Amino acid sequence: MESLKELYKIGPGPSSSHTLAPQRACAMFLSETEGLNSVKVELYGSLSLTGKGHLTDTIIKKTFDPIKVEIVFMKDWDESFPNGFYLFGFDKNNNLIKKWTVFSTGGGSIQIKERNSTIDKNIYKEKSLQEINVLCDKNGWDYYDYVHYCEGNIENDLNVILDTMIASVEKGLKTEGILPGNLKMERIAHKLYDNAKKIVDESQKKQLLLAAYAYATSEENASAGTVVTAPTLGSCGIMAALMKYCVDDCGIDRKKCIEGLCVGGLFGNLIKTNATISGAVGGCQAEIGVACCMAAACYCYIKGGHRKEIEMAAEIAMEHHLGLTCDPVGGYVIIPCIERNAVGVVRAMDAATLAMELSKVKKNRVSFDMIVDTMNYTGNKLAMELKETGLGGLAIEVEVDSDSYE
């Protein structure tokens, strides 16, 4: 498995697959191509079908500026991965000097057919949670110990990740107005937060605070703000909301929260390696489902859960998102994405609480590895129309002109 640095990434919204991944690939192409005078980009898969709403064309032009860029939204794609684009670089005489085939694999990660672009491979040699559990049993480790053993310098990076998550929540809570795009949706995180502060019942107050935090980050993402992939930008509100709540409302030590990010990241990394975190491949179960799974494992660890309880929390959270479709209305990461983040963080905490109680009275029959295999199978069975293409589900029920991103 790769480094957690390749799972938690800071970047511009609204979509890790549609903005962050193209930005990274185009920046690499620009830095590695001498004599580049103009560029042609052919977008395929969901990058073509929902690229306008996801700002794909905007981020590509911004990355190459001032070089002239032609962007074409294509249909048929013969490559092995469903989501990607071709980059063609030309010199001043319009001669082709370089071509890249870029796959946007989810969470802002990229693979380039013409070169080895993946970083930090094999940081974690174990490929399943079962293998990790064997090593932990042998050494008397918890999951954080395992991450620290494999990647001991990750805490410094995650300190920045934690700051960025909390900053995205705080900025979102302060910002009002209309979200970009033709949906004309009002930003409401600040209103939810104001209402939450007035609630007397602590349980209800907690839920609305978490929802406000998730809305705040997700609205920042929808506005092309700076957020953190956890594991994607479309699902960035779940872990950010949890971290904001733990640090500022519960007063939990930052070190413990960073350890929790390690544990949650480990589970996200396992799903990324053995299944997918791409909505274009596995549907929204690969985004919101995985984020909920990561948050459940993280929160269970922070609350003092042991490995069996943490595994159960992650499994419960993932199991009950199986089959969740990715059907963004108008290609925007707004409906149903933002609301799903708010629901997801509450479900993550519920999954952690349930796991810590269930583990006292029963042995779980479904392992985490089993649920990852099931999620991968389910994602493969989902219709293409329900995997970030904007061709099915809510995307065809709600009418909106998605030809421009105003």
Image (spheres, helix red, strand yellow):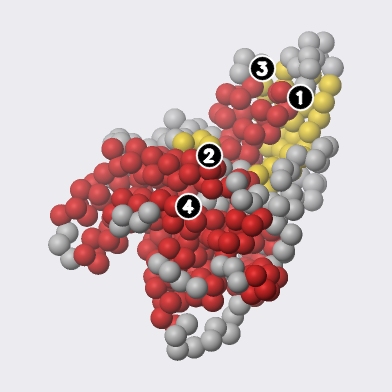
Q: Of all residues shown, which one is farthest toward the bottom?
A: 361
Q: CA distance from mark 1 to mark 2?
A: 22 Å
> Contact, CB < 8 Å: mark 2 with mark 4?
no
Helix or strand or loop: what does disc 3 sit on? strand
- Between disc 3 and disc 4, whose residue precedes? 3
Closest to the camera, between mark 4 and mark 1, is 4
Which amino acid, mark 3?
Lys
Task: Residue at 77% x, 22% y: name it.
Answer: 33
In the figure, residue 196 lies in which quadrant?
Answer: bottom left
Query: Residue 32 bears which disc, if any?
Result: 1
Which amino acid, mark 1?
Glu
User: Looking at the image, which is closer to me, 280 or 290?
Assistant: 290
Q: Of all residues shown, which one is farthest toward the top?
A: 92
Q: Is residue 349 visible?
A: yes
Q: CA distance from mark 3 to mark 4?
A: 42 Å
Give the x, y percent position of residue 81: 75, 50
Q: Is residue 138 above or below residue 110?
A: below
Query: Residue 68 bears which disc, if any?
Result: 3
Q: CA distance from mark 2 to mark 4?
A: 16 Å
Q: Is residue 39 above or below residue 122?
A: above
Q: Quadrant of the N terminus?
A: bottom right
Closest to the camera, between mark 1 and mark 3, is 1
- Between disc 1 and disc 2, whose residue precedes? 2
In the figure, residue 281 lies in which quadrant?
Answer: bottom right
In the figure, residue 126 lies in which quadrant?
Answer: bottom right
Query: Residue 10 bears which disc, if any?
Result: 2
- Between disc 3 and disc 2, whose residue precedes? 2
User: Looking at the image, which is closer to me, 399 or 298?
Assistant: 298
Report crowding for label 2: few under 14, some 14 to 19, many 20 or more residues within 10 A (C-alpha): many
Helix or strand or loop: what does disc 1 sit on? loop
